[in-house]
Image: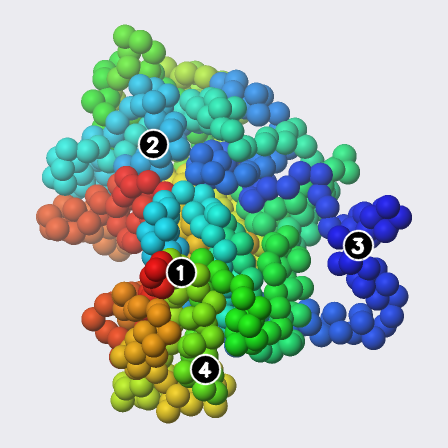
Amino acid sequence: MTRNRQMTTDRATDGGTADVLADVAIVGGGLVGGTLAVLLANAGFSVILVDRADPAAGLDAGFDGRASAIALATHRVLVAAGLWDHLGPRSSPIRDIRVADAGSLLFLHYDHSLVGDAPFGYMIENRHLRRALYDAQRAARNLTVVAPAGIAAMDLDSADARLTLADGRTLGARLIVGADGRTSRTRTWAGIRTTGWDYGQTGIVCTVDHERPHGFVAHEHFLAAGPFAILPTKGETGREQHQSSLVWTERDALAPALMALSDDDFLAELALRFGDFLGSLALVGPRWSYPLSLLVAERATAPRFALAGDALHGMHPIAGQGLNMGLRDVAVLAEVLADAKGLGLDLGSPAVLEDYERGRRFDNSLMLGMTDALNRLFSNAVPPLRLARDLGLGTVNALPELKKLFMRHAMGEVGNLPRLMRGETL
Amino acid sequence: MTAQTAPKTSSRPTTADDGEVARFQAIADEWWDAKGKFRPLHRINPVRIAYIRDRVAAHFGLDAGKTAPLSGLTLLDIGCGGGLLAEPVTRLGAKVTAIDAGEKNVAVAKLHADQMGLDIDYRHVLPENLAGLGQTYDVVLNMEVVEHVADLDTFLAASAGLVRPGGCMVVTTLNRTIKSLALAKIGAEYILRWLPVGTHDWRKFVRPSELAEGLAAHGVRLTDLEGMVFNPLNDTWRLDARDLAVNYLAFCVKDAH
């Protein structure tokens, strides 16, 4: 009896026990962390999801009025997570993409029927994604949601990983996933450095109602200040095709003045860039602005730790790839972990994490590089560059095979796809 | 319980033992460092564990796809080293006994399994000594061992005796071919430096026919052979039944009667 008690004391002082134990602890309950939590829990992992915010608070439309472009291949990840039953009826397909350059008659037209019947992807309002995730998380049996909760410390060692909450509770896991966004604290604690730069541009995001139907066409206008994207979303009943989400890139110097304008004046500025091809415009809901910058973590993993989503690669939203990249992280990590579990391997071990690191490195650098190059090429009014890109757009349009490759890229179908993005199961 | 905890608690205050634990911890860290000197074993682990899981499950009529598919089976891992195979098969549900001729290996493996919270019966014993105790197992693993033993027939006799009638054995080893001399000996030790020079004695490599005959003499029948082939482009291993020239896997059964 004495000896047993002594042992208990030893274990406690060694810190060998945690208040909650799981296979995987995910920090950050956003769209990336939340989707990973649902996928892993449904695949039989015990999962803890920690978020500093109350999950129910994110369901309000005012919390996040943005919409996300989900590429065709990434939408399969949402299907696999069981979210599409809710999202399908609330999303708008993107059937065509038209790319035009200001002051040029040349434009690039991507018609989805050139590469099959499927759309390029879907536009979904983030509030619907949050609702679908919230419901799926409540239904998942092996998932413990710890929120709202602050994290005071993270400890990683060769044997286990531990989070200490602000209230003193400890959570132990074989692997901690940092999905806590661009300013990730878990990334700092794990000693992973980042590189990146600012573009001197601001992204202004808002939603408009337009007189004529969008016909499921997305438009990208390359203006001197940066790209201006019009993305078809699903409007209210009876006006399903009359709502679009805008991503308006503007120079940092001008953005605050635009944001400070009255709704009428803001709409007038917007209409100048939007054009009149969809008739008269009206603003729906508030506007947001985000400084544009690129941020890449130098590594995706540390012992018993992996990064996913914006914590791994915060990118310029020009190609609408931020969430797609995050969900691609989710698909690769879920596959690596499911394979490891099937082989009885230690989930947080270097041998397992190496496969994730390897699976993400090429993909991330490719996408970040392409997106960055596109922006630098198009956010420029220097005449020779203008001519080059005019010719570039015309050339891509004239070469069907090259155009198909670009289109498949927009659909997320290029590269070595994880099983979930090919429509297979874990 | 008392017997197991007594030495641990009483030894805690002495510095000598702390030094010992620290030394074992350093060796354990080395075994489990996927980029370190045991990297080849870590890279080959997924393909050999998958083979064990699928073949053993099929042999006993179990579903390899469900959680802990090897539950209910007793398994002996001969030549366990740091436990790189014993730990995964324990997580797959098997009740595992793991033995090694190296006393330090056993201590290191035990330490690591404790940290992982895995219940594995590690013993410093040779198979021929264990066979004398009359214990038999549903599954016996002979992974990367037969090419190292002093006397092949004595070793095969002892390990065959440890399989219960109706049970099975999985063997991985290196074939004795010109290709294996070039790749596994000269390539892996001298050129790629995957393994310390002198890890293998090519003359002790075992041909599949020799393995089959050696085991048959002791009532164990070889029923399947697969090659394990390394792809340098993506740094992974895969099975290939047509290429047995270097690394190969054998599945063997001991008939019930």
Q: Looking at this view, is A94 or B182 the one in front?
A: B182
Nearer to us: label 4 or label 3: 4
Q: Which residue is mark 1?
A: B165
Residue B98 found in image quarter: bottom right
Residue B219 found in image quarter: bottom left
Gap between marks 1 and 2 measured at Cα: 48 Å
Residue A213 in sight in this render: yes
Q: Which mark is residue B154?
A: 4
Q: Looking at this view, is A158 or A78 the one in front?
A: A158
The three-letter code of the residue at mark 4 reads Thr
Q: Residue furthest front?
A: B257
Residue A303 in picture, x, y percent from top left: 58, 58
**Mark 2 belongs to chain:** A
Taking the spot 28% from the left edge, 39% from the top edge, the residue there is: A423
Q: Say what secondary structure mark 2 lies in.
A: helix
The 10 Å Cα crowd at callout 4, few under 14, some 14 to 19, many 20 or more, is some
Relative horizontal placement of residue B87, taking residue A168 as reference (left or right): left
Gap between marks 4 and 3 measured at Cα: 38 Å
The three-letter code of the residue at mark 1 reads Pro
Q: Which residue is mark 2?
A: A79
User: Split into 4 quadrants, where in the image is the C terminus of chain A?
Assistant: top left
Gap between marks 1 and 4 measured at Cα: 19 Å
Taking the spot 28% from the left edge, 11% from the top edge, the residue there is: A239
In this picture, is A271 found above or below B45?
A: above
**Mark 4 belongs to chain:** B
Nearer to us: label 1 or label 4: 1
Q: Say what secondary structure mark 3 lies in.
A: helix
In this picture, is A1 found above or below A363?
A: above
In this picture, is A355 found above or below B14?
A: above
